[in-house]
């Protein structure tokens, strides 16, 4: 492999509105293995005792375009791309390159709430097995961090808060009771809370006398940016062995095709040529569809991955002190909004000015810094990441219907302590991600379409992709997420 030089970039913190934020992480010292004290690679224990700074860009040692060869090239440095890289690094001896037009965590994951909840999931759904597998892997991940003598709260922003899916009507309460039964039968700890019992859990929450909640005490949340930084630093341990490299601010411009077989041999970026001996993996979130279309445009393969950007706003009130939350909360309407399509809108949807349909449902979490994070909105507006104050007002008004104390606090009072996160979720019309090879090109794999569940499904997705490339038997049915029959 050609020599590469690691350049460190540390842009200043932005204390204003955050829209697809470029990350800024402090120096972190690792003195641990990545996934527990028993982690090995090729039979040898791994340890991370180096001090790294984030925001690397790896370029060639000269100013001209350089050529590098890896076993696997991953397009996309979000939570999906980085966890796929991690899976290859700790589960095989393959070398991996991650390439991105931006920097890690600059997409949907970095703008999300960071919850790992099962309370709104449905057993027997197409994504249940994948979500459950990922859920268990995240639990193992946090436990192994703890086993090493580290604090998952500090390293990952990890909190076992439990989650509450709340309803305000007798009809919603009846639905929640049935949901608790199904979740319990699926092996999760779940219980139904009456309005009175719910008030004991969250005194500031008001659902009325007919309301209630499904409660999953084992559900967790984490800080997505901390988790990504932890994973990225662990991946970077392998760069000293020549097995890992990152190419950021370096968009992919074309595929490299073999003259003899027409197979994909790698990618060309704006600055580099990256050859791949095993696989090219497209994990570029909502950009995966347009990217795949552009990359295959000059080939004889007509590929249309119907993933679309689904814009979301979150409101972050820093150092919020009016009240505190001890659990993660979500209203029943969130489930309806999650499955809204381009043509169908749930009864909770509202209209905004341009004729666009906007779905707003209450979600509320309190992060490790004491910030109140409120959401969430869903709308199809293309790739726009512009902040819409009318949507912020909708979110605030909806939250006030569940937390009466917020009605006493004008949103304008939080101007100096307010941030807005905007992300573009990768939406698939059938509600499940695409994870599998491009028809006719087994060495090109697409991994996208997780919508708002990229974080919660990341580790299972990474395991599945690695199993495909390595030829391992999978723990999740791969056929359920294949691209075949879902694109044209």
Image: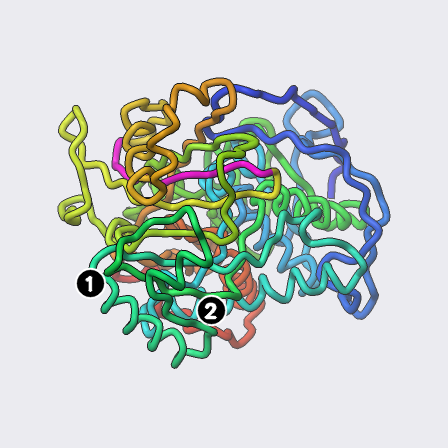
Q: Position of residue 295 (x, y in %)?
A: 40, 39
Answer whether labels 2 and 1 touch (C-beta < 8 Å): no
Q: Residue at x 51, y 23 (%)?
A: 417
Q: Residue at x 54, y 27 (%)?
A: 270
For the residue pair 130 and 401, the one nearer the viewer reads as 401
Query: Going from the N terminus, do you reach mark 2 or mark 1 first?
Result: 2
Crowdedness of circle 1 by 10 Å Cα count: few (<14), some, many (20+)?
A: some
Q: Position of residue 15 (x, y in %)?
A: 57, 21
Residue 482 appears in view: no
Which span is picked out in magenta? 370-381
What colouring style does the render use? rainbow
Q: Secondary structure at mark 2?
A: helix
Q: Residue at x 38, y 49 (%)?
A: 205
Q: Quadrant of residue 170?
A: bottom left
Q: Residue at x 71, y 64 (%)?
A: 144
The answer for how far apart the CA atoms under marks 2 and 1 are is 29 Å
Residue 364 appears in view: yes
Q: Is residue 452 magenta?
A: no
Q: Position of residue 198 (x, y in %)?
A: 39, 60
Res 170 label: 1
Q: Secondary structure at mark 1?
A: helix
Question: Left of 195 or right of it: where is 15?
Answer: right
Q: Nearer the viewer, mark 2 or mark 1?
A: 1
For the residue pair 291 and 170, the one nearer the viewer reads as 170
Question: Left of 249 or right of it: where is 235?
Answer: right
- Position of residue 390 relative to residue 215, above or below, is above
Q: Which residue is mark 2?
A: 132
Q: Quadrant of residue 477?
A: bottom left
């Amino acid at each position: 492999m050609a020599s590469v030089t690691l350049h460190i970039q540390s842009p200043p913190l932005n204390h204003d509105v955050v829209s697809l934020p470029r990350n800024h992480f402090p120096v972190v010292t690792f003195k641990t293995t990545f996934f527990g004290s028993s982690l090995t690679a090729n039979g040898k224990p791994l340890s991370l005792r180096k001090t790294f700074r984030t925001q690397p860009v790896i370029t060639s040692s000269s100013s001209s375009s350089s050529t590098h060869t890896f076993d696997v090239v991953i397009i996309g440095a979000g939570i999906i791309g980085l966890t796929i890289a991690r899976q290859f690094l700790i589960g095989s001896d393959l070398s991996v390159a991650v390439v991105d037009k931006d920097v890690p965590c600059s997409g949907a994951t970095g703008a999300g709430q960071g919850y790992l909840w099962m309370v709104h999931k449905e057993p027997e759904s197409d994504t249940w097995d994948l979500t459950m597998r990922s859920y268990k892997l995240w639990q193992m991940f946090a436990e192994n961090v703890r086993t090493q003598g580290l604090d998952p709260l500090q390293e990952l922003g990890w909190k076992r808060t439990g989650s509450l899916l709340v309803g305000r009507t007798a009809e919603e309460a009846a639905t929640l009771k049935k949901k608790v039964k199904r979740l319990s039968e699926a092996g999760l700890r779940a219980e139904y809370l009456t309005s009175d019992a719910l008030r004991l859990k969250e005194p500031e929450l008001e659902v009325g006398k007919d309301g209630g909640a499904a409660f999953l005490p084992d559900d967790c949340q984490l800080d997505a940016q901390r988790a990504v930084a932890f994973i990225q630093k662990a991946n970077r341990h392998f760069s000293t062995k020549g097995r890992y490299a990152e190419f950021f601010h370096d968009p992919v411009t074309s595929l490299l095709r073999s003259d003899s077989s027409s197979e994909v041999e790698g990618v060309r970026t704006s600055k580099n040529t990256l050859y791949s001996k095993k696989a090219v993996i497209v994990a570029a979130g909502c950009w995966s569809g347009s990217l795949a279309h552009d990359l295959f445009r000059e080939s004889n393969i007509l590929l249309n991955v119907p993933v679309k950007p689904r814009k979301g706003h979150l409101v972050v009130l820093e150092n919020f002190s009016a009240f505190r939350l001890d659990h993660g909360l979500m209203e029943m309407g969130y489930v309806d909004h999650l499955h809204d399509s381009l043509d169908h809108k749930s009864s909770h949807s509202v209209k905004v000015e341009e004729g666009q349909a906007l779905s707003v449902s209450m979600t509320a979490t309190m992060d490790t810094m004491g910030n109140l994070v409120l959401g969430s909105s869903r709308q199809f507006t293309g790739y726009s990441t512009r902040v819409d104050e009318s949507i912020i007002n909708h979110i605030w008004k909806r939250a006030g219907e569940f937390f009466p104390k917020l009605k006493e606090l004008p949103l304008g009072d939080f101007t100096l302590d307010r941030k807005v996160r905007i992300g573009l979720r990768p939406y698939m019309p059938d509600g499940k991600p695409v994870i599998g090879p491009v028809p006719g090109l087994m060495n090109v794999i697409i991994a996208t379409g997780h919508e708002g569940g990229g974080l919660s499904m990341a580790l299972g997705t990474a395991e599945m992709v690695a199993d495909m490339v390595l030829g391992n038997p999978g723990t999740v049915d791969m056929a359920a997420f294949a691209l075949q029959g879902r694109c044209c």
